[in-house]
Image (cartoon, rainbow, N blue to C red):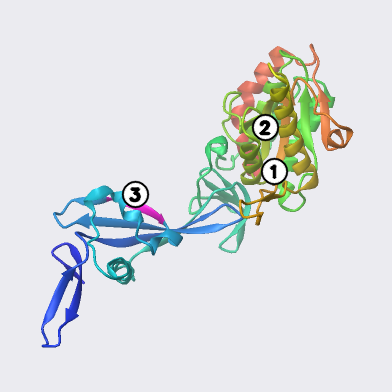
Amino acid sequence: DEQRGRIVYKRERPDGFLDVVPLCNWTGRIVEERVVDDGATAEMNFIIKGTLDNGRPLPPAEVPAAQFQGMSWTTKFWGSDAVIYSGRDGRDRIRDAIQRFSMEGKARRTIFKHSGWRKVGGEWVFLHGEGAVGASGTRDDVEVHLEAGLAAAVLPDIPDDLPDAVRATLAAWTFGPDRITLPVLAAVFRAPLCEVARAVFSLFLVGSTGVFKTEIATLAQRFSGPFTAHSLPGNFSSTANALEKLTFLGKDNLLVLDEYTPKGSSSRQVAEMHDKGERIFRAVGNVAPRGRLTDTTAMRSGFTPRGLVVATGEDLPLGQSLLARLVVLEVNAGDVSPRKLSFAQDAASGFPGVMSGY
C-alpha cells in the first residue's frame, strides 16, 4: 500500500491489529513499457516515475526489464535520496507493489533503432530517422531513433511534383563520365532492395586526393537525408566493430564509409586499416559477420550487413578474393566537372524526396 508518500507493508498481528511497516521513503509507478527494437533483438524497458515522501518528484528512470526485479536501479537513477529501508523481503515487496500500482494506465510503445523496411501494423513501411514512409505516404505514428552516424537519414513527404523532381535529379548527375555516375546512381536505388536481396558487393571509389571522390559519395548519400561530407555515416578511422554495427543498423540504406587510407607512421596502423577493410567488405560479400566468442567461449551473435556500402579511398584493399567483392570505380583528375558538380550539390536538397517517392 501507499501511506504518507511511501510504499508500506501492512501486516496483521495475532491480536488482530495491523502493523504498518515503511519499506522506503518514496513511491513509484511504471508509466510506460518501451520496446527498443534494432531488428535483431527487442528489449523491454520500463519508464518509472517516482516521488519522495517530501513531495519532490524524482526524474524518470528507464530501467531494462531484466534489471527491474533486483531493484538496484534506484540508486543509479535516483541517487542516495531514494532510500530502500533494510529488512527481509523489502526489495521484493517494493517491486511487487510498483507492478500492482501500475496495472492500469501505462503506455506501451515500440522504438525502432534501424532504418529500412519493416512490417508495422500489417503494412510494409520504410523506416527513417523521423518516422516511416508507407504506401499511403508519411507515417508519423512510427517512432524511430537512429544512432549518431545515421541520425541524418531523414526522408521528407513525397513531393507533389515527383516526376519533375526525378527529371531534375537525373539532370544533376551529369558532372562526370557515365562509368562513374551511372553505377553510383544505380547503387542508390539498389540499396532499398536489400530487404529482398542483400547486396553481395560494395562500391569502391578510388583515386588520389582532390579528384572529388568524397563529394561524389556524399551526393549519393544525400538521397538518404541531409548528409554532408563531414557527417557521412561512417569513416574508416572508426573501429571495425562500430562499422560492422553501422552496416547492420543502416538496413536497406546506402552507407558511405569514407577515407580508406592504409597509410600511417607504423606498419601496425597500416595492418589495422587493411584488417578493417577486409572485415567489412568480406562481411558484405558473404552476407555474414565474423564469428566471435564471449569470454565463456559461447558463440556471440554478430551484426550481418543489411545495407549497401560505398567506400572511398586512395588505395584498394589487398587480396584477389576481396577485390572480387568490390565494384571498383576509378576517379581520375579531370573526370569531374567542378561547375557541374556544384550544380548537383545545389540540387541535392531534392534527392531525399525522390527517394521517398521511390
| Percent coordinates x, y for residue 297 in the rendering | 66, 54
Q: Amino acid at mark 2?
A: Val
Main secondary structure found in the magenta portion: strand
Query: What residue do we see at 72% from left, 46% from top?
Result: 290
Is the residue marked by circle 1 packed among few (<14), some (14-19), or many (20+) residues within 10 Å?
many
What residue would you read off at disc 1? 307
Image spot of residue 330 (x, y percent): 82, 22
Badge 3: residue crowd in 10 Å (few <14, some 14–19, many ≥20) = few
Residue 76's mark?
3
Q: Secondary structure at mark 3?
A: helix
- The image quadrant of residue 99 is bottom left
Is there a contact, CB below 8 Å, between mark 1 and mark 2? no
Q: Which of the marked residues, 1 or 2, is nearer the chain's N terminus?
A: 2
Residue located beneath label 2 in the image: 256
Residue 301 coordinates in the image, percent (x, y): 65, 53
Q: Nearer the viewer, mark 1 or mark 3?
A: 3
Residue 164 visible at all: no
Helix, strand or loop for disc 1? loop
Label 2 packing within 10 angstroms: few (<14), some (14-19), many (20+): many
User: Please, what is the three-letter code of the amino acid marked with disc 1?
Assistant: Gly
Q: Amino acid at mark 3?
A: Lys
The answer to which of 184 and 41 lies nearer the viewer is: 41
Q: CA distance from mark 1 to mark 2?
A: 10 Å
Q: Which residues are magenta?
A: 59-63
Q: Is residue 42 visible?
A: yes
Residue 23: give x, y in percent of width and height. Answer: 22, 66
- Measured in 3D between alpha carbons, the distance from the residue under mark 1 to the one under mark 3, in whole angstroms, is 37 Å
